[in-house]
Amino acid sequence: MTGTASRSVSAGARLVGVLSIDRSIVDAIVAHARRDHPDEACGVVAGPVGSDKPTRHIPMQNAARSMTFYEFDSMEQLRLWREMDDRDEEPIVIYHSHTATEAYPSRTDIAFAGEPGAHYLLVSTREPDTEEIRSFRIVDGVVTEEPVRILDAGVDPHAVQSYMFGQSPATVDYECSGS
Amino acid sequence: MAIEVRIPTILRSYTGGAKVVEGSGDTLNDLLTDLDSRHGGLRARLVTEAGALHRFVNVYVNDEDVRFLGALDAKLSDGDSVTILPAVAGGALGFAAAAAISRHSAAAGAIAQHNAGRRSPATAG
């Protein structure tokens, strides 16, 4: 394990993208995960088709009501997917929590992942005081981690912090960019 | 008879990118066979080798989940709309989770023992 693995995002060949998301939405997702802990929480952040911008947070019920499994209620999912269609939106982020393990896709997550265009955001609530938040693409069974860039729209729209959470060797602890 | 079928992103490689296709059949099973004749491979993504609807997909006839309508035997009529969506599911379930939970149980046990020990030092062990 090297702690200095990738200061530069571009150096990591597997880091093909980035999830840019408003802090207010991340806070709402974390609050949802904490509220449902120790059960897994799940939901969607929708955004305009093709924009890659998550703008509308929709917490979903975990129909499985389980500490180790989540599943959207099929009827709630149908209503939401239709609503997104009507609004020219798509699921930009699909999130769920792991409540006793790290925020990394399990084999179950990989087997079920059916939205190749979505960012799969995982939140771990196993520690009571800190959250681990990580984002992945899951396409044809291949998992690719990507940095999470949290946008502080309320503070200064030009001040963008980009970093990844968690303790993976690929962690970019803190990186400022002007873009 | 024409039945409109809405195809999710992940399966559009079978329909040349089309979001909506048309098919026919008296049951969902017939419809999927009909679709497969023009969109080869689609059926296998929805139906297991054992001939059951795949766990990873949700199929709806109009506003109903076909699991409540007889699954592949669900009856279809002209003008029905069939929607296919990938099930959104997952979770920590697996060996890693089991290991972590057992570690947590061990930790909880140790803490309980510790607390019991503080209340009654003689029994600490």
Image (cartoon, rainbow, N blue to C red):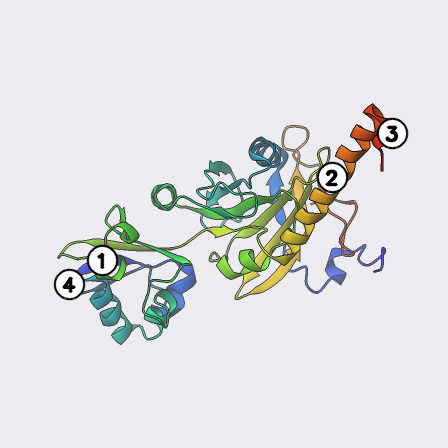
Mark 3 vs mark 2: same chain? yes
Q: Which of B7 and A108 is in front in this view?
A: A108
Specify whether residue B120 is in view. yes
Q: Position of residue A134 (x, y in %)?
A: 66, 48
Identify the mark at residue B4; answer none if there is no mark.
1
Amino acid tagged 4: Asp
Location of residue A20 by image quarter: top right
Badge 1: chain ID: B
Residue marked by disc 2: B109
The disc, 4 or 2, on the residue closer to the chain's N-terminal end is 4
Amino acid tagged 1: Glu
Q: Position of residue A117 (x, y in %)?
A: 50, 56
Amino acid tagged 3: Ala
Q: For label 3, count other residues whose C-alpha is less than 10 Å away and answer few (under 14), some (14-19) or many (20+).
A: few
The answer to whether residue B77 is above or below residue A127 is: below
For the C terminus of chain B, the image quarter is top right
Location of residue A72 by image quarter: top left
- Quote the CA–CA distance across marks 4 and 2: 59 Å
The disc, 4 or 3, on the residue closer to the chain's N-terminal end is 4
- Quote the CA–CA distance across marks 1 and 4: 13 Å
Badge 3: chain ID: B
Residue occupying image coordinates x 22% and y 61%: B73
Mark 1 vs mark 2: same chain? yes
Discs 4/2, front = 2
Q: Is mark 2 on a helix, strand or loop?
A: helix
